Image: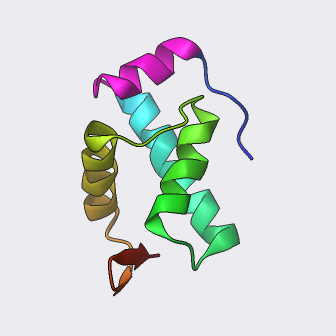
Amino acid sequence: MFGIINGYAAKALLMQKPNPSSRWKITDQIKKVLEVEASISKNLLCKKVLSAWGISWNGARLNNYFENLFAEMDIHKISYGNNVFF
């Protein structure tokens, strides 16, 4: 959907040191996925965005990073059991 982002940017994201441009790009990617695929689970949304960065897993650090982004974006979410949907 987005193409692969360069390896340096992916490493910065993994280290939780993304520059403001990367943060904006991730936020934009989240919005684009939501425009096309809402309602979508949080796990699948994160997986789609991370795949554009060449990252195939969502560990605790990245999960916290996404949680902070979602809170800042103030997007509508629905919880159903242990699953969250946007």
Q: Is 37 rendered above or below residue 69?
A: below
**Residue range corresponding to the magenta coloring:** 7-18
* Residue at 47% from the left image edge and 39% from the top image edge: 57
Predominant secondary structure, magenta span: helix
Percent x, y of residue 3? 73, 34
- Picture layout, residue 58 above or below residue 31: above
Residue at far top of view: 8
Q: Nearer the viewer, residue 79 or 73?
A: 79
Residue situated furthest front in the rendering: 81
Residue 71 image position (x, y, % from top left): 26, 63
Q: Tell me if residue 9 comes above or below residue 20 in the rendering.
A: above
Examine the structure image and report whether residue 8 is included in the region drawn in magenta. yes
Residue 56's image quarter?
top right
Specify whether 28 is left or right of 63.
right
For the point 40% across and 38% down, the residue is 23
Where is residue 53 shown, x and y percent of the image? 57, 31
Q: Is residue 73 magenta?
A: no
In this rendering, position of residue 14 left or right of residue 71: right
Identified at 43% across, 18% down, the residue is: 11
Give the percent coordinates (x, y) of residue 51: 61, 39
Q: Nearer the viewer, residue 4 or 83?
A: 83
**75, 10: nearer the viewer:** 10
22 or 11, which is in the foreground? 11
Q: Is residue 48 above or below residue 2?
A: below
